[in-house]
């Protein structure tokens, strides 16, 4: 199973590809911009329990440091504390727990990616397909994130 940082990196890449016309690549060479990030916090807290004492609702929180740098070195977006928090429900059948753990981290990563990319596009004034049209971007996990 992939770690949350790998899942977030994959989901941020997919979300940028989906919402912009930028071509996302995994190398800096030839890129118009480079996105780097590190997950600084990740936590899961149970909110409620079923009749057998198993947690069935969770609050997931994540924080990250994110920088988008243009090829000229200009900072296009920076946040030292991108925060994400969302509630999720778990499976009702014990046999589904192992499967759901992977599915849950994929869902959290996707939700975080949608939020992050939306923040970046809003901050830069870019609507999908406008600024950055035809551009290339490289993503870098930087040891723990997008």
Image (cartoon, rainbow, N blue to C red):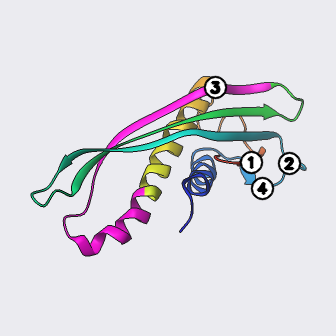
Badge 3: residue crowd in 10 Å (few <14, some 14–19, many ≥20): few
Gap in angstroms between the C-alphas marked 2 and 1:
9 Å
Q: Secondary structure at mark 3?
A: strand
Residue at numbered disc 4:
26
Gap in angstroms between the C-alphas marked 2 and 4:
7 Å
Residue 125: x, y in percent?
A: 62, 24
Upstream in sequence: badge 4 or badge 1: 4
Instruction: In this rendered view, identify the residue nearer to me: 129 or 99.
Output: 99
**What span is colored magenta in the figure?**
75-104
Badge 1: residue crowd in 10 Å (few <14, some 14–19, many ≥20): some
Residue 109: x, y in percent?
A: 50, 51
Gap in angstroms between the C-alphas marked 3 and 1:
16 Å
Residue 65: x, y in percent?
A: 64, 33
Residues tagged 2 and 1 counted as in contact (Cβ below 8 A): yes
Q: Which residue shows up at 63% across the image and 44% down it? A: 20
Q: Secondary structure at mark 2?
A: loop
Is 8 magenta? The answer is: no
Q: Nearer the viewer, mark 4 or mark 1?
A: 1
Q: Secondary structure at mark 1?
A: strand
Instruction: In this rendered view, identify the residue nearer to me: 47 or 72.
Output: 47
Q: Which residue shows up at 83% across the image and 54% down it? A: 27
Give the label on residue 57, or none.
none
Residue at numbered disc 3:
80
């Amino acid at each position: 199973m992939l770690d949350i940082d790998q899942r977030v990196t994959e989901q941020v890449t997919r979300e940028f590809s989906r919402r912009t016309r930028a071509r996302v690549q995994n190398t800096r060479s030839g890129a118009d911009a480079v996105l780097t990030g590190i997950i600084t916090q990740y936590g899961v807290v149970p909110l409620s329990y079923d009749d057998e004492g198993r947690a069935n609702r969770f609050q997931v929180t994540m924080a990250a440091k994110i920088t988008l740098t243009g090829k000229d070195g200009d900072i296009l977006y920076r946040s030292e504390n991108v925060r994400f928090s969302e509630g999720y429900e778990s499976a009702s059948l014990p046999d589904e727990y192992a499967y759901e753990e992977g599915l849950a981290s994929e869902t959290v990563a996707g939700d975080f990616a949608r939020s992050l990319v939306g923040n970046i596009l809003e901050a830069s004034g870019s609507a999908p397909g406008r600024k950055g049209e035809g551009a290339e971007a490289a993503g870098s996990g930087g040891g723990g994130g997008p």
